[in-house]
Amino acid sequence: MRAADTASADPGPLAPITWAVVGDHDQRVVVVDLDADAGERRRVSLAPGEFADHVVQRELASAPRWVWDDTARRYPPLLAAGVRVARSHDLRLSHRILACSADIAAPGALRAAAEWEGGPSPAVAAAAATLFELAAPTDTTGDIAATLAEFRRQRGALSTARAGSGLHLLAAAESAGALLAAEMHAAGLPWDQARHDAVLEAELGARPPSGARPSQLELLAQRLREQLDDPTLNPDSAVRLLRALHRRGIAVESTSRWELERVEHEVVPTLLEYKRLARLWSANGWAWSDEWVSAGRFRPVYIPAGGVTGRWASAGGGALQIPRGLRSAVRADPGWCLVVADVAQLERRVLCGMSRDAALAEASRGRDLYEGIVADGAVATRDDAKVAMLGAMYGATTGESGRLMPRLRRTYPRAMAMVDAAARRGEDGAPVSTSWGRTTPDAGATWRATQARASEADASTADILRAKRASRDRGRFTRNFIVQGTAAEWALAWLADLRTRLTAFPEAATAAAASGPVFARRPHIAFFLHDEVIVHCPREHAEEVAEAVRDAAAAAGRLLFGDFPVDFPLEVRIADSAQKG
């Protein structure tokens, strides 16, 4: 490995560390060192092939914060060369946060720099094989002058942030997440192709010729034709399938699972099983593994902050949708193991910490939160508690959730008051923000026009109903945004802290060669999904890594919520496979 293998705790973007701004000029890579006031101290111009060695030297000397346009574009070539960096500042990700944050008093200069809102496809950038692929001719944001200008705009905007804002932390955590996304793609998730094939054959039958259905799927298709008395039915056509169901007197508006399960008819179990196997075949079948699995690794493309709340998404490979039945194919290399950890009821506990609701904190301490709610007498059963909390976060006003909400408000007034207030702001078209300052997008011109039309003297009943519906929809969105977005911040803090802790482990005797030059002998995060982390770990370090996972979770809670007594209990397993049991 060529990179430095130690990383001190991140002191934050305003601490007196070296800023190294990376950009391009005349087919060369330019690195500009800035002082604490963002003034230029020195400039180095490098041939693309010299950049990796320069990074190694700088990491060993001072571990600077690398400032670049797009981590998904800049970092993968370094990882391929065996170079890991400790920290960075991703200008594109930070721009999206800062330009619309309600915590920034003077965002005008950022909003005017609209070229920083988009960017190269992460899927293309992550697959780049050259050491330093230059920007396309139409993209000038990677130019060193443009990069420096944007960095200074962001520094200026942050200087206007309201007192107590967590935007500095969010920009640092988001940038750390971008580094990790590239690292997980480079290292890959250990994947047992033989086990995957065995699951597919057991469920679907032998691999069919191109264009043909697997045998088990074809058997189910034939059974559907018989049960629906439609010999030519193609069950993959939603339109034809609905027509066939209607002809048999099955009055459904869609073929979604939740609607079909309410119907009593012999075709329903067959259709649900067909849909399950068809999904397996199309989303994770042989063609999927041909494209995304190689040399014992599944390498999806992650998109940090791919969702509006800051949750991650996936641009390729479906990393966020691995079926439970295929988790047995996630298998550690010989001499290695998996440390699998997930946090229970993350968003509910985040709601507790954000609102500083002492009663809800006590209900969740050291136990299942839903059982704690039952013990407090708010509801009668664990299922009721689950339904009620979902209603609290998603704004259910009717049905079972609506019936239970008043009980939650009486028992946990601070938590319910916080989400209710967020909903009211959303209904009025106002923005809401997460704990660290990620802010909802603007309600939009269409929304405002709908509300304005309803207030006019000649507004029809339909106009008024349309405006009320749009207002309620936005209120439900803002109610959930603050909780889901802050949960995404907690997860980022967990990941960033754990990433740093793992660099302190010594090299293993047994290499996981397919994990690449940076991670072949060190524990590393191989998978992340909202509230779950999988670390690929040398077996001799398993217990210590498990403890690091727990400690990082506790540190994330303290970073967001200080000394407020909300806990984030983890289920941590050390195993050869990601499948439970």
Image: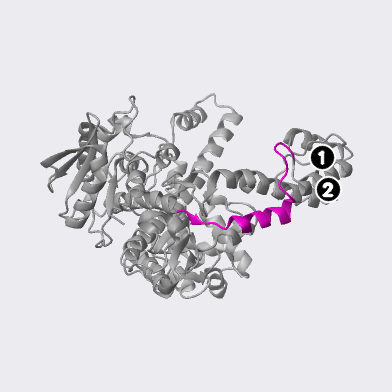
Range covered by the magenta-colored residues:
188-212
Whether residue 179 is visible here, answered yes or no, is: yes
Residue at 50%, 30% in the rendered image:
450
Q: Residue furthest left?
A: 41
The kind of residue on which mark 2 rests is Val
The picture places residue 407, in percent across and down from the top left corner, at 55, 64
Name which quarter of the figure residue 230 lies in: top right
Q: Nearer the viewer, residue 75 or 247?
A: 75
Q: Residues within 10 Å of mark 1 (few under 14, many from 20)?
A: many
Residue designated by label 2: 267
Taking the image as shown, residue 391 lies to the left or right of residue 564, namely right
Query: Left or right of 220: which side holds 133?
Result: left
Inspect the image, locate mark 1, and give the three-letter code of the amino acid beneath it: Leu
Compared with 391, 576 (above or below) is below
- Where residue 98 sits: x, y (%)? 30, 42
Residue at 28% across / 55% down in the picture?
2
Residue at the disc numbered 1? 245
Q: Where, by quadrant of the figure, is residue 11 drawn?
A: bottom left
Task: State the residue in front, 261 or 526.
Answer: 526
